[in-house]
Amino acid sequence: MDIERLIEQVVVGLGYELVDFETSPKGRLMRVFIDVERGVTVDDCAAVSNQLTRVFEVENVVYDRLEVSSPGLDRPLKKAADFERFKGSEVQLRLRMPVGNQRNFAGVLNGLVEGAVLLSTEKGDVTFPFDDIEKARLVPRF
């Protein structure tokens, strides 16, 4: 059974987006990060946690602890749709392989066009293939 697909099915069924899913090395701790356009509340986390607990019991998923939370202000960008949704936001990117001896980039996200992420940096506009991005996160503004 693909646990991540099971979790995503439950989360999406409740009207949320599954942002990320992490497990401890032995799979005893599961962390589920959810999001929704209006922002995630404690009640949202409780609702998802309660539903996942019931589903895990039915599906015989063994775990010690389940944590459900929002992705935070520095939300990771994982899916191609995230790069369109957060167009105009400040982001930090880390590439799998360096470009000109540089793997880390920061700037304003200009979206995703034909599989390439567009980023405006202090040094100008740059484009990276989506598949070359190892990590991407929003930069919170206070």
Image (tube, rainbow, N blue to C red):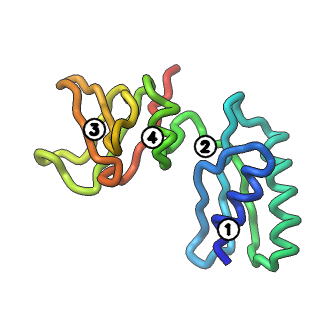
- Residue 105 - label: 3
Structural distance between the alpha carbons of marks 1 and 4: 23 Å
Residue on which the image places disc 2: 71
Structural distance between the alpha carbons of marks 2 and 3: 21 Å
Callout 3 environment at 10 Å: few (<14), some (14 to 19), or many (20+)?
A: some
Q: Position of residue 115 (x, y in %)?
A: 35, 45
Residue on which the image places disc 4: 137
The amino acid pointed to by label 4 is: Arg
Structural distance between the alpha carbons of marks 1 and 2: 17 Å
- Residue 29 - label: 1
Q: Give the quarter of the figure containing the N terminus.
A: bottom right
From what the image shows, is residue 93 above or below residue 51?
above
Q: Earlier in the sequence, mark 2 or mark 3?
A: 2
Q: Earlier in the sequence, mark 1 or mark 2?
A: 1
Structural distance between the alpha carbons of marks 2 and 4: 10 Å
Callout 2: SS = loop
Structural distance between the alpha carbons of marks 3 and 4: 11 Å
Q: What residue is shown at x 27% (from left), y 43% (from top)? A: 128
The amino acid pointed to by label 3 is: Phe
